[in-house]
Image: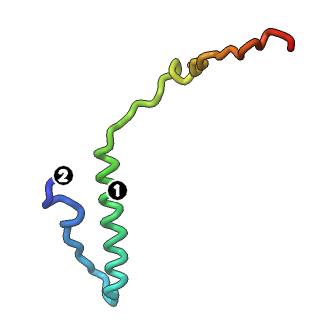
């Protein structure tokens, strides 16, 4: 996204009357944050869902360790 199209550089036009500077700043921050988040989600790498075969696979069991003399009655 180029700088001129970045959400930080998009002008905000307010057509409502009787809005305080604090209210305008709050709404502006929320809207710009949403625009940035949406832009980031559109640019995020899409990962394919695992296939049925992948979901059905179990993890491989780890290495078995034999205890010393575990088979001998002590």
Q: Quadrant of residue 63?
A: top right
Q: Classify mark 1: helix, strand or loop.
A: helix
- Relative to 6, is 64 above or below? above
* Residue sitting nearer the eye, 57 or 52: 57
Residue in front for this viewpoint, 4 or 18: 4
Residue for badge 2: 1
Disc number placed over residue 45 in the picture, else none: none
Q: Position of residue 30 (x, y in %)?
A: 37, 69
- Residue name at image x 68 percent, y 14 percent: 66
Quadrant in the picture for residue 25: bottom left
The secondary structure type at the circle numbered 2 is loop
Residue closest to the far front: 74
Q: Is residue 12 above or below residue 55?
A: below
> Distance between the Cα atoms at labels 1 and 2?
13 Å
Please identify the residue farthest to the top as the structure is shown. 72
Residue 22 horizontal side relative to residue 4, left or right: right
* CA neighbours of label 2 inside 10 A, class few (<14), some (14 to 19), many (20+): few
Compared to 17, does 61 lie above or below?
above
Return the residue at label 1: 37
Residue beneath the point at 35% across and 84% down? 22
N-term mark: 1 or 2: 2
Residue drawn 35% across and 37% down?
46
Depth check: give the residue in front, 74 or 66. 74
Residue 61: percent from the left, percent from the top?
A: 61, 18
**Which residue does the image show at 18% across and 66% down from the upper left?**
9
Which quadrant of the figure has residue 64?
top right
User: Residue 44: where, in percent of width, then height?
Assistant: 32, 43
10 Å neighbourhood of mark 1: few (<14), some, or many (≥20)?
few
Residue 11 in the image: state x and y as whole percent.
19, 71
User: Is 27 situated left or right of 12 in this image?
Assistant: right
Q: Indicate the quadrant containing the C terminus: top left, top right, bottom left or bottom right.
A: top right
How many marks are shown on the rendered structure? 2
């Amino acid at each position: 996204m180029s700088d001129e199209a970045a959400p930080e550089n998009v002008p905000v036009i307010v057509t409502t009357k009787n809005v305080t500077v604090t209210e305008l700043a709050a709404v502006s921050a929320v809207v710009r944050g949403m625009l940035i988040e949406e832009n980031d989600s559109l640019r995020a790498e899409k990962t394919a869902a695992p296939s049925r075969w992948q979901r059905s696979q179990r993890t491989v069991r780890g290495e078995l360790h034999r205890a010393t003399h575990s088979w001998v009655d002590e």
